[in-house]
Amino acid sequence: MSPAALTCWNQLQITSVTLALPVVFERQELLVDLTEWVKRFSEYFKGDGSHTQILDASGYRENFLFRCCTQQSSKLPVKSARDALTVYFTVAFVALPPEPMQPRLSDARVGFFTTPVLVGGPTRATTVQYVISKWDLARRKQLLYVIDKSVPEMFHETIKKGVLVWNETFPDCNGDAPLHCVAPADEDYPDEYEAGDGRHIAIFMTNPSTKGLLGYGPSAVDYRSGEILFASVVLGLKSHVKICSDYSERC
């Protein structure tokens, strides 16, 4: 299934997910039903597969994703308020680069997010090693952070400063400033930007279910090397408004 085909699904109720995989040795395709596999991601949120729905799908040049919702199962005729909570989640797929990035082994003394990589060979037992999850700047050259139009304008400049300040650390490493951040009012704001398009690192604001959470950064990595392929930044709107109100006279 191509990303272009997936864009046609946005207005449809999805009841099944199928994927055509090439069978190299026969030069044919194999049709695989992924519906139940996609629904199993609901287990991460303590959801039940029979109470999980695939709401829509979006396809882009380098990635596609499914947006789903789930609830916990209940033996009661009427669910309690806690059991009736609906959790929305996204399952993302990203095209792998032709050549995997040179991985960098993690060091327990330094706090990096890591990716488990299987290492083995014909005469060597397979073991698990952990590598750092990181962007391949040699391949990407620049990381473009795009502030979504849903983010209140009063936060745009502060968010941009928060992103660009990290460029101060790069001249000592490779002499470049690879991070760039744009807001909707900027002239270089990408016309083709769309939430979910893996070519851009989107910055959103929402109200996470975790109370007091300032933000988090979901991502998808190359299982072969730990290279980050797709990422976004989700900031807690309520927390930022409260902190702003408590410490700023302007707010």
Image (cartoon, helix red, strand yellow):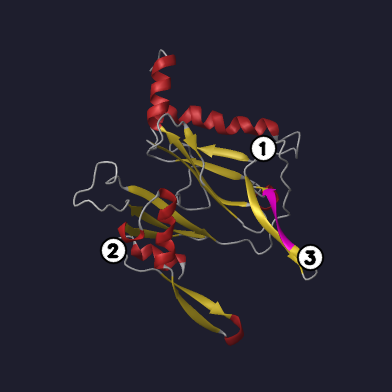
The mark nearer the N terminus, 3 or 2, is 2
Observer-side mark, 3 or 2, equals: 3
Which of the image's four quarters has the C terminus?
Answer: top left
The kind of residue on which mark 3 rests is: Arg
Q: Nearer the viewer, mark 1 or mark 2?
A: 2
Question: Residue at 56% across / 62% down in the picture?
Answer: 95
- Nearer the camera: disc 3 or disc 1: 3
Q: Position of residue 119 (x, y in %)?
A: 72, 60
Residue annotated with mark 3 = 124
- Separation of residues labelled 3 and 2 (CA atoms): 48 Å
- In the rendered image, the vertical position of residue 183 relative to residue 5, given as above or below: above
Q: Residue farthest to the right?
A: 123
Disc 1 target residue: 177
CA separation in Å, label 3 and label 1: 41 Å
Q: Which residues are magenta?
A: 126-131
Q: State the residue position of label 2.
A: 13
Res 184 visible: yes
Q: Which quadrant of the figure contains the N terminus?
A: bottom left
Q: Is residue 220 left or right of residue 156?
A: right
